[in-house]
Amino acid sequence: MRIVFMGAPEFAVPTLSELIGAGHDIAAVYSQPPRPAGRGMAERRTPVHAFAAEQGIEIRHPLSLKDGAEQALFKALDADAAVVVAYGLILPAAILDAPREGCFNGHASALPRWRGAAPIQRAIMAGDTETAVNVMRMEEGLDTGPVCLAESVPVGRDMTAGELHDRLAVVGAGLMVRAMAALERGSLNCTPQPDDGVTYAAKIKKADTRIDFEQPARDVHNMIRGLSPFPGAWFEIDNAGKRERVKALKSRLSDRAGVPGEVVASGDSLIVACGSGSGAVEFVSVQKAGKNACSAEDFLRGARIEQGARLPA
């Protein structure tokens, strides 16, 4: 089939790669524009843009698809279908209606749970033990379209968002190839989402990332793994009267007890007590600002955090 692909981050690259491998004609790739990034603020392409360029595919990166001229250019591609994976722009009706068979979205949640911007992070932060990837026929509502194919994926108790992201990207790529094959055969059936169980995966804000040790240990652990590796949950330490921020990348639950924010073990491991009676969180991997990630044991060699200390609130 002749397909327009629309996506931006690393999560979308496996789907584009699998569609190419399945023999589909990729008419064009739409992605976010290159933007300044890094210390030198050089313009950086999105991962989808970079991969498409390697494949010799035409790349477009309009700032908006609301303009009539852009919509006409899209329609002129004469596509059978559009595949959308984490593109980052809302598709107006004129775009949704342009491909002969419609637009199909690969979404990383068990719809209707976790519609919206951050389904992987929010699922882990909520303590979900299972999530899914869906192929959904798109409509104008936010992730409200009928589901055509879905595959469940278990979420381990210590799995991070980064680990789940990588797993879902692979599963989602295979699922989309299956969906496009069924669409080409005329056998793709899509079922409306139920009205019950709708939740929204709001975009992660800075206010969501500071660890509050007054919360139960399980909630703190879920927050850490749900925000790892990016943007990262963080806490502060007092280093010779100066506060330093430390990002938590990996943790596990501990049955140690103490006052919330109290360091109940320091030396070979860093364990901090959480909300009263809920236990503690052991930090496995951390990262100081401007430094590389390291084990908690290596971190403690330089941090000098004594057992019984209280982390700054």
Image: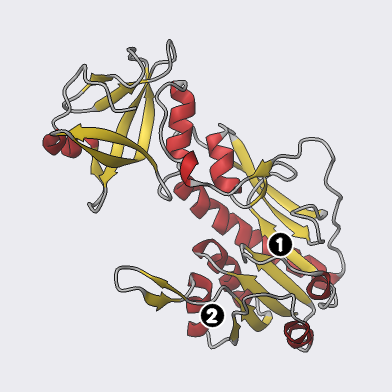
Q: Secondary structure at mark 1?
A: strand
From this viewpoint, is residue 33 visible? yes
Farthest-out residue, top: 277
Residue 139 rendering spot, x and y as whole percentages = 82, 61
User: On the picture, is 44 further left or further right than 165?
Assistant: left
- Quadrant position of residue 173: bottom right
User: On the picture, is 97 further left or further right than 181?
Assistant: right
Q: Quadrant of the N terminus?
A: bottom right
Q: Name the residue tied to disc 2.
A: 52
The answer to whether marks 1 and 2 mark residues whose Cβ atoms lie closer than 8 Å is no
Q: Amino acid at mark 2?
A: Ala
Tell me if mark 1 has few (under 14), some (14-19) or many (20+) residues whose alpha carbon lies within 10 angstroms of its own.
Answer: many
Q: Nearer the viewer, residue 157 or 260?
A: 260
Farthest-out residue, front: 241
Mark 1 or 2, nearer chain start: 2
As measured in the structure, the alpha-carbon distance from the residue carrying label 1 to the one carrying label 2 is 19 Å
* Residue at 28% over, 41% down: 245
In the image, residue 148 sits, relative to residue 100, either above or below, namely: above
Q: Name the residue tied to disc 1.
A: 105
Residue 178 rendering spot, x and y as whole percentages = 71, 63
User: On the picture, is 55 further left or further right than 195?
Assistant: left
From this viewpoint, is residue 159 visible? no
Residue 113 rendering spot, x and y as whole percentages = 70, 41
Q: Amino acid at mark 1?
A: Asn
